[in-house]
Image (spheres, helix red, strand yellow):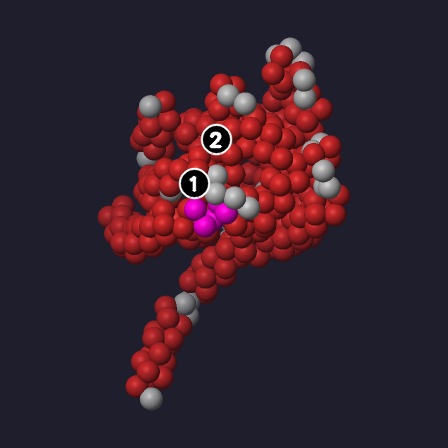
């Protein structure tokens, strides 16, 4: 009876915290982003052991290396819009004309950047020996860039209406995952992996554009030169920040592939995918809070915004630490489940990488949610640039 009473009080207290429309929307976005992140990382993680055993460590490593190369070209296409445009949409969400202007400007820039990126990529693939041997794989892998152009997660995040994009993304990823299990049967089928990912990217992209037009009545307009320049200036610090972050988030596979063999890339990539999947579990918290803090910080004092962020940090750091300790202890078991054997190098990789779960989470909270939302993009850019170079 006492337990029921206490649980009832706790549930009522939690409900009271989300009675306002603003907080209900925050909770809705959190759950939508949770599903999105589970689909984005956990679902592919189910595919990892299948691809690892079916293709073999060498082909698995080759695909991971190709994806690592393409990521850097994706950075150019995404620029800093995933954060700068999100903030712009969040602030002007009630101004239909301004929202259409931001969407159109960002899409045009991404399209231009993608053409430039492909030109550079093609020259590299057909002139550098390490890429020429598997040129088909690299060109097919580049196809996933289409998702960066057509799939505007930043728009839905800024509008705080993530449930629409979650449905689209979930359907496309489930279909791709099913097709991988059906089609990929041996190491000879390795080229089908990027083809299937491309199919998923273009499908989700087309459906999301349809949702923009149908649900949000977005009108595509030809932006002025000043509007394009504004978006470029607004995102330039974040572009440098993203580039710096990716020096230490994605460069490992790239450097290992250049210095070693795809066999060892395969072992390392297995461990890295696991860590990134675990990090993604906390992603919805930050991504739901980002537009919420962006909107609040525009209408309150700096001190009040700082208080909100540090209040969140108390609980967030505890959760991150518990996850880190769990991964540290369960590393051998995780590797065995995914690969069918205890690969000592992969186990050590997971344990070393697990530290980033804590510091990466706090970096997102204080850096992206904090410094960027509060107008200190330059400080964030400098900190991650020097960390990335180091």
What residue does disc 2 label?
A: 250
Q: Quadrant of the C terminus?
A: top left
Q: Is residue 335 magenta?
A: yes
Q: Quadrant of the N terminus?
A: bottom left
Residue 344 vs 307, above or below: the answer is above
Instruction: Identify the element where label 2 is drawn.
Output: loop
Q: Is residue 117 magenta?
A: no
Residue at x 73% of width, y 41% of height: 185
Residue at x 46% of width, y 64% of height: 24
Circle 1 or circle 2, nearest the eye: 1
| Disc marking residue 183 | none
Q: Nearer the viewer, residue 48 or 332?
A: 332
Number of callouts: 2
Label 1 crowd bin: few (<14), some (14–19), many (20+), radius 10 Å: many
What residue does disc 1 label?
A: 347
Where does the image place residue 197, in percent across and percent down from the top left? 67, 39
The magenta segment? 332-336
Instruction: Identify the element where label 1 is drawn.
Output: helix
**CA gap, disc 1 and disc 2:** 19 Å
Main secondary structure found in the magenta portion: helix
């Amino acid at each position: 009876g006492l337990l029921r009473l206490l649980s009832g009080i706790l549930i009522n207290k939690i409900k009271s915290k989300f009675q306002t429309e603003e907080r209900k929307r925050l909770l809705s976005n959190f759950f939508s982003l949770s599903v999105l992140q589970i689909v984005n990382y956990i679902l592919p993680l189910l595919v990892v052991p299948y691809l690892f055993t079916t293709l073999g460590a060498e082909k698995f490593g080759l695909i991971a290396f190709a994806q690592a190369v393409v990521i850097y070209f994706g950075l150019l296409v995404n620029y800093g819009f995933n954060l700068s445009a999100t903030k712009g949409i969040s602030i002007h969400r009630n101004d239909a004309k301004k929202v259409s202007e931001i969407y159109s400007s960002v899409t045009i820039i991404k399209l231009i950047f993608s053409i430039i990126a492909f030109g550079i990529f093609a020259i590299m693939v057909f002139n550098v020996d390490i890429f020429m041997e598997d040129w088909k794989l690299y060109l097919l892998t580049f196809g996933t860039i289409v998702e960066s152009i057509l799939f505007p997660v930043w728009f839905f995040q800024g509008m705080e209406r993530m449930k629409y994009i979650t449905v689209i993304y979930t359907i496309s990823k489930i279909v791709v995952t099913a097709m991988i299990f059906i089609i990929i049967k041996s190491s000879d089928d390795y080229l089908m992996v990027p083809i299937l990912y491309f199919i998923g990217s273009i499908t989700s992209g087309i459906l999301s554009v349809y949702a923009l037009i149908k649900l949000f009545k977005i009108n595509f307009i030809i932006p002025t030169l000043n509007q394009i320049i504004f978006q470029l200036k607004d995102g330039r610090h974040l572009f440098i920040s993203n580039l710096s972050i990716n020096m230490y988030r994605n460069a490992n596979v790239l450097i290992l592939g250049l210095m070693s063999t795809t066999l060892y890339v395969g072992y390392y990539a297995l461990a890295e995918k696991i860590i990134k999947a675990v990090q993604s579990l906390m992603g919805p918290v930050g991504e739901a809070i980002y537009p919420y803090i962006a909107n609040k910080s525009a209408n309150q004092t700096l001190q009040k915004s700082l208080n909100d962020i540090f209040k969140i940090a108390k609980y967030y750091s505890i959760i991150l630490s518990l996850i880190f300790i769990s991964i540290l202890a369960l590393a051998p078991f995780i590797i065995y489940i995914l690969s069918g054997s205890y690969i000592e190098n992969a186990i050590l990789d997971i344990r070393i990488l697990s530290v980033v779960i804590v510091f990466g989470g706090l970096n997102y909270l204080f850096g992206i949610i904090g410094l960027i939302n509060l107008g200190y993009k330059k400080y964030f850019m400098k900190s991650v640039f020097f960390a990335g170079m180091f």
